[in-house]
Amino acid sequence: MGAKIQKITPNLWFDSQAEEAAKHYTSIFGNSRIGRITRYGKESEGRAPVGSVMTVEFELEGQQFVALNGGPHFKFTEAISFIVHCEDQEELDYYWEKLSEGGDEKAQVCGWLKDKFGVSWQIIPSNLTDMICDPDPAKAERVMRALLQTKAKIDIESLRQAYEA
């Protein structure tokens, strides 16, 4: 019997960088691995080279993904992003540095970034939602104001100071 299939699996459409992206992401996140790789066969002649990578199954921190080399027809947008919850500034800095490398610097705002493949990520403190949903509306508003003033990468200490002010 095979491994249990994850109920919902994000499928990421790349032009031709599926394997490169999967290797990049698995090099950044712990508890990650590359799984099955499928290749285009003779039926795809004229659309993709026979033997070239069609899909790459990979896992990041226990979350399964599929990367597809589907051609240039579709591009990533900020309408979908992946949230990375970080316990401290060191972890936040690590993911920000690794995922923003080679990405669109103009797309870096309020903890959001676009990586070199055009995929959007939110690199945030694990307790951000708790702070902006605090029952004390003044605390929540101060944190939201501090967050919205963030030009790119989040500074956890400035959010904590706003929360505790």
Image (spheres, grey):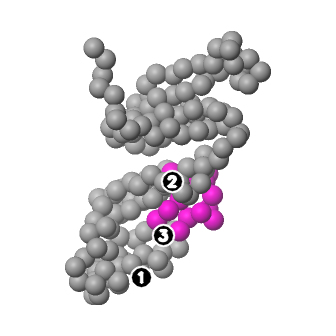
The secondary structure type at the circle numbered 2 is loop
107 horizontally vs 129: left or right: right
Residue at the location (54% across, 40% down)? Answer: 12
Q: Residue 88, percent across and down?
A: 31, 61
Gap between marks 1 and 3 measured at Cα: 11 Å
Q: Which mark is residue 145?
A: 1
Q: Tell me whether the residue at label 2 lies in contact with that at label 3, contact meaning CB atoms closer than 8 angstroms.
A: no
Q: Residue 1, percent across and down?
A: 27, 14
132 horizontally vs 112: left or right: left
Is tag 2's residue or tag 3's residue first in the polypeptide sequence?
2
Q: What amino acid does circle 1 point to?
A: Arg
**Which quadrant of the figure has residue 104?**
bottom right
The secondary structure type at the circle numbered 3 is loop
Residue 26 showing in the rendered view: no
- Magenta region: 99-114
Count of labels in the image: 3
Reading the image, the residue beneath label 3 is: 110
Does 122 appear above or below 9? Answer: below
**Which quadrant of the figure has residue 141?**
bottom left
Residue at the location (34% across, 33% down)? Answer: 6
Q: Is residue 124 covered in magenta?
A: no
The secondary structure type at the circle numbered 1 is helix
Is tag 2's residue or tag 1's residue first in the polypeptide sequence?
2
Reading the image, the residue beneath label 2 is: 80
Gap between marks 2 and 1 measured at Cα: 24 Å
* Quadrant including the C terminus: bottom left
Badge 1: how crowded within 10 Å, few (<14), some, or many (20+)? some
